Image (cartoon, grey):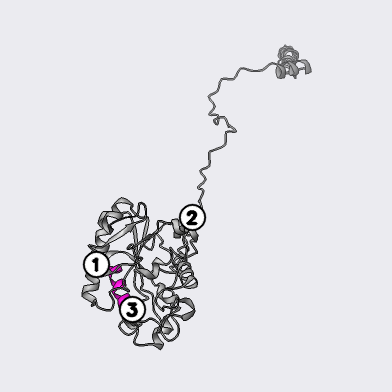
Amino acid sequence: MKLKKVSSAYMYLIVLAILSGIFLPVACSPVSNEEVTEKISTPSTITATTSMPPPTTNTPTPVTTTTTTPVPETTTTPAPDPDRSAAYIYELNPELTPVNYDSPALLLPSEDMGQEYIDRMTFICDSPTYWLWPLELLSDGKASKQIWTGPEGTMTLAYQSSYHILDPYDYTQRSIRDVVAMHPPDILIIALGINGISFMDEEYFSAEYMDLVTDIKEISPDTIIILQSIYPITHQYRYYGSITNAMITEGNSWIMAIAEETGCMYLDTISVLLNDEGNAKDELMLNDGLHPNVEGLTLILDYIRTHAYVEKQG
């Protein structure tokens, strides 16, 4: 009986094992290939919060370029040196009063301004400059209106305030002031002094000259006024002795001082006529020893053109 019970229990275990073997493989059987394929092909819906980087654009970032414009170099043209071509003559002849080459009134060398520059000029003058007219050295020859002097071809500085010159526009005698008012000059050259240097001292000479200049400046303020040196003479001049080149150069120093005081410019035209002895060159003068000839006056005009008034200087 006992053996029979054991066998029943044993049999029960065997049956249980068999039953487990039938169902367990089904639960744990591997997934078929078809199922794997189906699972891979079917996407799963995944909900996730992902921080994505901002989209990259191809718009270039503006670049600020600093362009340096080259600054042109400022070239300052140095002022020309004074024309000292006659300086040695004053050293050789100490009785002459030398030119003050450092004077701010002295007209410096310039480019040749040509005939047009001369055509702008009016000359209030005595006889040495008057000869520009009869010798026809100005553009319109004897029809020129550029020479203003007395009807006899000269005038004296001492009488400038009351003397009547010949108005070249209608040949009427008028005072200098009236003619200036009626025909305001562009550039006015005052070339006076030879008549008077023999009897006028510095105070007298300078007072008359200054009176003329200041009146003209007041009447015609836009006129450029240039004071010209007195020309030298030769020993052939019949009054040589009562007038000398020592006296003339001293008078020129007075004229330069007046130019400085009144803001006018000074033309050192005497320098082109002097010889080594401190007299006028004979070959540049008429036989009277007082008046420059054609060559002398042409040389003077050339000097005026190449020592021109320049706005920045004046």
User: Along the line of sight, which residue is nearer the eye, 227 or 41?
Assistant: 227
Picture disc at residue 71: 2
Residue 147: give x, y in percent of width and height. Answer: 38, 61
Q: Which amino acid type corresponds to the residue marked 3 in the rendered image?
A: Ile
Residue 265: give x, y in percent of width and height. Answer: 35, 66
Relative to residue 294, is residue 249 depicted above or below?
below
User: Along the line of sight, which residue is nearer the eye, 284 or 113?
Assistant: 284
Quadrant of residue 126 in the image?
Answer: bottom left
Picture disc at residue 186: none
Residue 125: give x, y in percent of width and height. Answer: 35, 66
Q: Which residues are magenta?
A: 249-261
Asked whether, in this view, residue 223 is left or right of residue 58, the answer is left
Disc 3 secondary structure class:
helix
| Quadrant showing the C terminus | bottom left
Picture disc at residue 248: 3
Q: Is residue 182 rendered magenta in the image?
A: no
Disc 1 secondary structure class:
helix
Other-residue count near label 1 (Cα within 10 Å), few / some / many at <14 / 14–19 / ≥20: few
For disc 1, the marked residue is 159
Disc 2 secondary structure class:
loop
Sequence order check, earlier mark of 1 and 2: 2
